[in-house]
Amino acid sequence: MNFIIAFLVVMVFMFIGEWVSTMSHAFIPSVFVSAVLFVIGFWTILPKDVVTQASYGNEFVSICVAMLLVHLGTLMSLKELVAQWKAVCIALLGVCGTMLLCLTIGSLIFNWKTVVAAVPPLTGGLVSALLMTNGLKAQGVTALVALPVSMFVIHSVVGYPLTSLMLRQEGGRLIKEFKAGGSKLGPEVTELAEDEQPSAFKSQNVFNLKPEYETPAFTLARVAMVALFSTWCAGLINNAINPNVVCLIFGVIAHQFGFLEDNALNEAGVFNWLMYGLLAYVFAQLSVTTPQIMGSIILQIIVLIALGLLGMFLASRVLAKPFGMSWQMAYACSLTSLFGFPADYILTSEVAHTVAGTKDEERYLLHNMMPKMLVGGFATVSVASVIIASIFLKLI
């Protein structure tokens, strides 16, 4: 019975976060609300092992991370990355701007280990926060274990509304451009329906089985095969390349050749289960915090977030014109490194729907903003953040 109670508590914290995010139109991130609830719980009556009791322990996460990284590869299209190479460059160079300012100015203000522990989750999403947390625990740097998780939670509070603001300004500019052109859609503009996967990320399934044989278990078995093969290959080279990076690379390859379908874990119906488990495990790391610890790291987090966002802004402002973008669009592409998919898709859809006065205007906005935001997020969160985290673990 205790296990069911633990699972109920975890899910209640999750849906409260989602409801608050929905009511605030994503200006208050769900991860922030859920994290606050976990912190309050850990500081009062919640058992420290509540997440483990809810079935989300170390064994679950070991499987979960490998599977999710392979899954991220099924969300990517090399063709679309090439077509939107400018957005990819802007996003990656924005991340470089963040690292440059944090590692230089940040290391002058705080000690080196603090900066190194905080930067990967600042330039990536949930997976990089988890990789840094587990790496710090493995190296015995327990004093900094709460830092990556806290950085991941707090930077989203700033990242979501700032990205929305940039997209709204870009949307306003595009509406004026659309009206100046006679408010006519070109033949290349197609609608991205909210309930459909963007067409740029479709691939052909090589199996071509009848629907009754395309079962969730078949999909999960193939994802697990790719994850196992990736881990085995990483072991052959003594993990010279982080196994997580290898999982991502082979996930992309398996998707491109049609061995795995688009959005594989969603198709199998387990993506949300794995993501909730991973989020819960990350929030469980907050159990080591105390009011004193949080008070001691909050200044570091705020300063490094400010430096990181400034680095992104400067890189975007300088590079926007050479890459043929407005600085608002360039900055929005860089900011996708804070959260990635699906938040970038949701924010762009919501802004386009809000700013546009007609359906044609909404289609025009989606056509011009959505591909840039998607590939920016995939390039940074899905690829760069995993690589950055694996490199930074060696710098501690």
Image: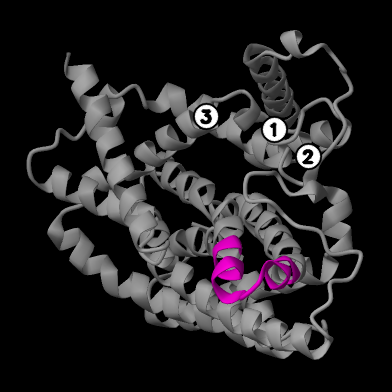
Which residue position is annotated with label 1? 238
Which residue is label 2 attached to? 252
Disc 3 or disc 1, which is closer to the eye? 3
Residue 354: x, y in percent?
54, 71
Q: Residue 365: give x, y in percent of width and height.
A: 70, 71
Q: Residue at x 16, y 43 (%)?
A: 42
Element at label 2: helix
Q: Say whether disc 2 or disc 1 marks the residue closer to the N-terminus.
A: 1
Residue under the image location 67 percent in, 82 percent down: 316
Name of the residue lying farthest toward the top: 213
Q: Is residue 237 above or below residue 107?
A: above
Measuring from the top left, give residue 349's x and y in whole percent: 60, 61
- Label placed on residue 64: 3
Residue appearing at x 84%, y 37% in the figure: 203
Look at the numbered discs 2 and 1 and tell me whether their residues touch, using CB distance below 8 Å. no
The residue sitting at 61% across, 31% down in the picture is 266
- Residue 47, by quadrant, is top left
Q: Confirm whether the magenta stretch covers residue 358.
A: yes
What secondary structure predominates along the stretch shown in magenta? helix
| Whether label 3 touches label 1, CB < 8 Å | no
Q: Amino acid at mark 3?
A: Cys
Which SS class for mark 3? helix
Q: Amino acid at mark 2?
A: Val
Q: Label 2: few (<14), some or many (≥20) within 10 Å?
A: many
Range drawn in magenta: 349-364
Query: Splitting the image into 4 quarters, where does residue 261 fall?
Result: top right
* Amino acid on which disc 1 is placed: Asn
Q: Quadrant of the N terminus?
A: top left
Q: Decide: is 228 above or below 153.
A: above
